[in-house]
Image (cartoon, grey):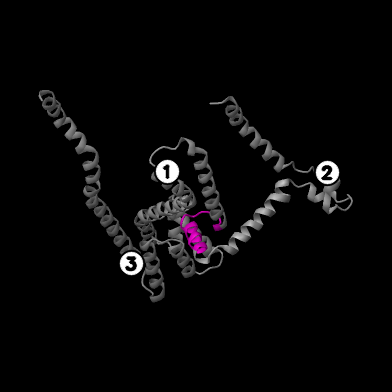
Amino acid sequence: MQPTLILGAALLPAAAGVAYMSLKGSKPSVSTDDLIGTNRPTDLRDAMLQQSALDRAIKPTLEKIVALIHKVTPMGWYATIQQRLMLADSKGKPEVVIVQKIVFCILFFLVLNVMKNVAYGPPLIQKLLYIGKPVLGFFLPDILLKNKASKRQALIQAALPDYLDQITVGVEAGLGFDAAMSRTAKSNEGPLAQEFMRTLQHVSAGLSRAEALRGLSNRNKVPELRQFVGAILQAEQYGVPMAQVLRVQAAEQRRKRRQRAEEKAMKLPVKVLFPLVLCILPTLFIVLIGPAGISIANGI
């Protein structure tokens, strides 16, 4: 490797740090006159110059770019990204995800152009890589976001039966439904506990219990959670005892969890078949038939 490349790679973090400090700037000092209000009126230009270059130039530019992206993005695509962010409980915005997709696409394309001199293989494979890597970079944020959302929904689905058992015990012990849900959420950790606490915060903020529970159902795409919310809403509407409904729902969710476990166990032999055929059996045939083949070849 050339010394120039080594020196450039070593100075790159220092250059990034200097650029960050130059954009960040320093905080303006506050004098005693500013605190007691006896200083002269502040000049608008001086006040703007006291801000860093990041606040004066880059942030407004980024806000304009985000607004432009929001305008040109199709509503269906925008709604899909927003729904995935909600399912993943991410605090980001759809515009940020779209910018990430564009940046990753450009980066993958540039990396491909830099590494084209060391590319190997048939020309067809090189052309497929030339097209496929930018496409992969464009869809990489979607893949990561969808994977995060799927894992979070799976954790909620797996934890729901145990949470329902705890809520049922609390209601049968004399607690109200909200108090039992709050105690269950505080004594556990995970995404479902966070969702329960968010629902209770919405109730404390003034929403009715029915509206807060519908919000809980809409924020998650777990069928079992929607079934639980629907049963609670029907129990409130028709005056069915809450403890009885919770007991039935807890038993139903435990049965469904056992069925999912049995279904995964039934799929296991089929999943093991492919590694067995592709990896283990060829090696076994080489070990068993290899010496005989070598002896036959030497005899001939």
> Which mark sits nearer the N-terminus, 2 or 3?
2
Q: Estimate the spatial distance between the alpha carbons at disc 3 and disc 1, rounded to whole Å.
A: 64 Å
Q: Estimate the spatial distance between the alpha carbons at disc 1 and disc 2, rounded to whole Å.
A: 64 Å
Give the magenta part as a residue range. Answer: 77-94
Place of residue 231 in the rendered image (x, y in percent of width and height, measured from the top left):
37, 69
Place of residue 280 in the rendered image (x, y in percent of width and height, measured from the top left):
22, 37
Q: What residue sits right under mark 1 in the picture? A: 126
| Left or right of 105, for residue 177 | left
Place of residue 238 in the rendered image (x, y in percent of width and height, measured from the top left):
38, 76
Q: Is residue 82 magenta?
A: yes
| Residue 31 numbered tag | 2
The amino acid type found where label 2 is placed reads Ser
Q: Is residue 122 visible?
A: yes
Q: Estimate the spatial distance between the alpha carbons at disc 2 and disc 3, rounded to whole Å.
A: 67 Å
Question: Are there few (<14), some (14-19), or many (20+) residues within 10 Å of tag 2?
Answer: few
Residue at 48% in and 39% down: 116
The amino acid type found where label 3 is placed reads Gln
Most extreme residue toward the top is 298
Q: What residue sits right under mark 3 in the picture? A: 244
Residue at 16% in and 29% down: 290
The amino acid type found where label 1 is placed reads Gln
**Foreground tag (2 vs 3):** 2
| Left or right of 23, for residue 169 | left
> Which mark sits nearer the N-terminus, 3 or 1?
1
